[in-house]
Amino acid sequence: MSDPDDHPAHTALRDAASEILTPHGLVLEEIVVAGPRTRPEVRLVVDLPEDSLGSADLDTVTTASRELSARIDADDSLLGPDPVVLEITTPGVERELTAARHFRRSRGRLLDLTVADDTRYRARLLGLTAGDVLLLRQEPGRDDRGRPRRRPAGTPERLEIPRADIVSARVEIEFDPPADLAQLIADAESTASDPTATTKES
């Protein structure tokens, strides 16, 4: 995955974008430049800060996009004097989670995970410890016939998996998250900060 810090030539653009995004409660995730030099296509991927839950509001993203477009039009030092196709977007659910910040921003989401031994889990991410361990609750869901799926053999409902053991991880689309989600996350965070704490089972 590209990271804005990997592109020293984009320092001015990164700084200008951050200046505009911060008041809107957004952060710059990455900068992607494609297309011909005569008309480059610049895509800025933005997201919520790491300590926030949920997804960025699209109206807010649109407003920030207009403000940044105006800044780029007024300042040729950011992307040059030639026309530029600028797009500001959010990561989307298809984005694979790789960095620790991706997992922190996905707290409360259902994940499709595969670990190093090829075991696949469908689990809700409740937290990430200071030691980089994912705190998860398995939610296998139901099959196409509505029958409950089983957890992988021999695995408990609650999982603690080091992020280093994750081979792939993606967010699943979900329309009806549990009503007690905030409490589940709070309990997991309490356990992460105090390993002797007792986590309530739902």
Image: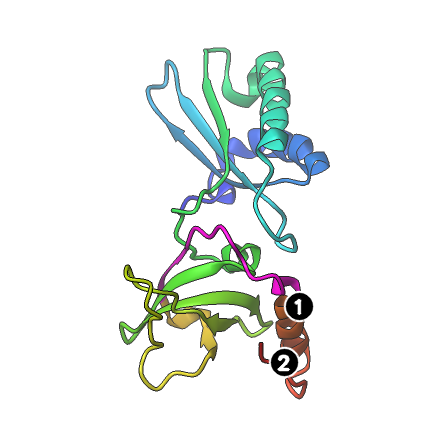
Disc 1 vs disc 2: Cβ atoms closer than 8 Å? yes
The percent position of residue 147, horizontal first and vertical second, equals 32, 68
Q: Is residue 12 visible?
A: no
Query: Is 153 placed above or below 104 here?
Result: below
Q: Is residue 185 magenta?
A: no
Question: Start and end of the magenta stretch?
Answer: 167-182
Image quarter (top left, top right, bottom left or bottom right) of the C terminus: bottom right
Sequence-wise, the earlier of marks 1 and 2 is 1
Q: Is residue 180 magenta?
A: yes
| Mark drawn on residue 200 | 2
Q: Is residue 20 left or right of residue 141?
A: right
Residue under numbered circle 1:
183
**Residue, x 49% and y 65% (percent of image)?**
124
Q: Is residue 89 left or right of residue 51?
A: left
Query: Is 22 placed above or below 63 here?
Result: below
**Residue, x 38% and y 69% (percent of image)?**
140
> Which element type, helix, strand or loop, lies under badge 1?
helix
